[in-house]
Image (spheres, rainbow, N blue to C red):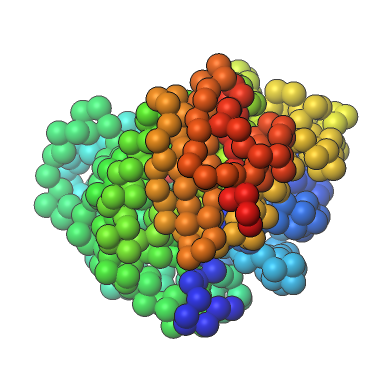
Amino acid sequence: MSDSLSPPWWKGASIYQIYPRSFADSNGDGIGDLGGVLHQLDYLEQLGVEALWLSPIFRSPMADAGYDISDYRDIDPLFGSLADIDRLIEESHARGMRLLLDFVPNHTSDQHPWFIESSSSRDNPKRDWYIWSDRPNNWRAALNAGSAWTLDERTGQYYLHLFLPQQPDLNWRNPEVVAAMQDVLRFWLDRGVDGFRIDVAHCTGKDDTFADEPRCITQPLSDFNDQPYSHEVLRGLRRVVDQYPGERVLIGEVNIRSTRQVLQYYGRGDELHMSFNFLPLDIGWEAEGFRRCIEEIETLYAPADAWPTWVLSNHDNRRHRTRYHGSLANARAAAMLLMTLRGTPFIYQGEELGLEDAHITPETRVDPGGRDGCRAPIPWLATPPHGWDGAATWLPFPPDADTLAAERQRHDPLSTFSLYRHLVAARRASPALRLGDWHELPAPPSVLAYRRQHVDDQRAVCINFADTAQVCPLDGQWLIELASDGHGEATPYDGRLAPRQALLLRPKDV
Ligand code: GLC
Ligand code: CA
């Protein structure tokens, strides 16, 4: 643990997202589980990441793959038991990795006892734990669910759900809800987790006039819901984690495409420690888009003393390799970008193998939101069923599961896995990469070049987005520390970049 003078661990960490359903299976039912994660800790340790974030593993009817929780204090039998998570906390810690859980405050499952009570009668003491109305407004739910209001036949009122009808929204203006959910945090903090990724952290507060929202004609409310009360909720959660030693962290999913708004969720250092900013998910493989995005984030975050995060892939969006025309070279150059910007990078399981989205047919489709492609199981072994013995996996494997399998890549120095491993190690070794300032360097239009500097430690990065060679001379003399295609390492940089090549450089005299 760091003392008050050194920066908190999460600023320097590379954080790895595990989507447990698809990570690794330990009991042959075709669905990943905690036993599978325990079994693959060597792999994660070899990659070198400092923290793991697990998507939800709690009791759930699985209408939204676990983001519909029916008991926040228990593990779904599909994933294992409380004993398994205790062991995972312990074993991750023993290997120097922190463990973060997913906290889903906006909604429960409709099978949660709280909602079963709430919907049992209009005068049930838990009626006000959810949001009920006689007249629905025009709010639209996400995940293709249509109206955000569903009529409860029994009591004749509508309940609000910003996601599926099986995910009723909690009423965070009710102090009993606040207390009950803060207790959930304590339950897991007491068990030793290092923090939480907070699901749709911008959604807990609702416009309490329930006015129609013009943007809901085309968009779900959760794309832009941004109410002062959500900040109040976050301040309350922050007070809870701040009572624990060991720099526990709150990382919020603020799924709004506006840097200014996202920034508000850091509060005055009394809300989120970090928020996702998903702007990069909308940028294609082009230098100019990234240049503008990075400049915007640098310009707004630095003065606010807010620490950025970087995400190229997750369980809700097409994988970045798929978005970047399926090109592995592009995906690898993007990895260099992800891991060398100022801020905490999040690696989504399988991107370190260069995976693409699986091809999903109407027959293999599971998710009502159409997000199955990026949730395909990880191919551990080259030969089918790729380390998933037993029942067929819940989703098909991604393309090239044989050549991209983990076992093929772990000991191949030129593999994508090795590139990520070296990038994680490079961050660990360099204060400039972990904490340094970011300065753009002059470069041709299809190249993004920047320098990172912390006291006397320096690195430079040049990323060629073009499929032609580019010339990008830099002042001073530089050595290639790492190349996205593995070529030219430890040689002097001559100002030339191969097509789709990204280079990490260090000053020659160091
Ligand atoms: C977040 C999750 C997503 C889920 C939704 C509702 O956006 O990342 O997977 O469907 O919230 O919980
Ligand atoms: Ca299993």
Vertical position of residue 328 compared to residue 424: above or below: above
Residue 387, horizontal then vertical, whole percent: 84, 39
Q: For the point 40% across and 35% down, which residue is it?
A: 442
Residue 149, horizontal then vertical, whole percent: 28, 41
Residue 220, horizontal then vertical, whole percent: 29, 36
Residue 40, horizontal then vertical, whole percent: 78, 53
- Which of the two residues, 10 or 429, is positioned nearer the viewer here? 429
Outermost residue, right direction?
383
Q: Can residue 408 be seen in this view?
A: yes
Q: For the point 47% across and 82% down, which residue is it?
A: 4
Vertical position of residue 320 compared to residue 72: above or below: above
Quadrant of the frame with the N terminus: bottom right
- Which of the two residues, 235 or 85, is positioned nearer the viewer here? 235
Q: Is residue 241 left or right of residue 95?
A: left
Report the label total: 0
Q: For the point 71% across and 29% down, which residue is it?
A: 397
Toward which corner of the image does residue 419 lie, by quadrant? top right
Vertical position of residue 105 compared to residue 318: above or below: below
Q: For the point 27% across and 69% down, which residue is it?
A: 268
- Which of the two residues, 462 or 142, is positioned nearer the viewer here? 462
Toward which corner of the image does residue 48 lie, by quadrant? bottom right
Q: In this view, does 402 lie to the left or right of 243?
A: right
Q: Is residue 56 visible?
A: no
Quadrant of the frame with the C terminus: bottom right
Q: Is residue 219 left or right of residue 254?
A: left
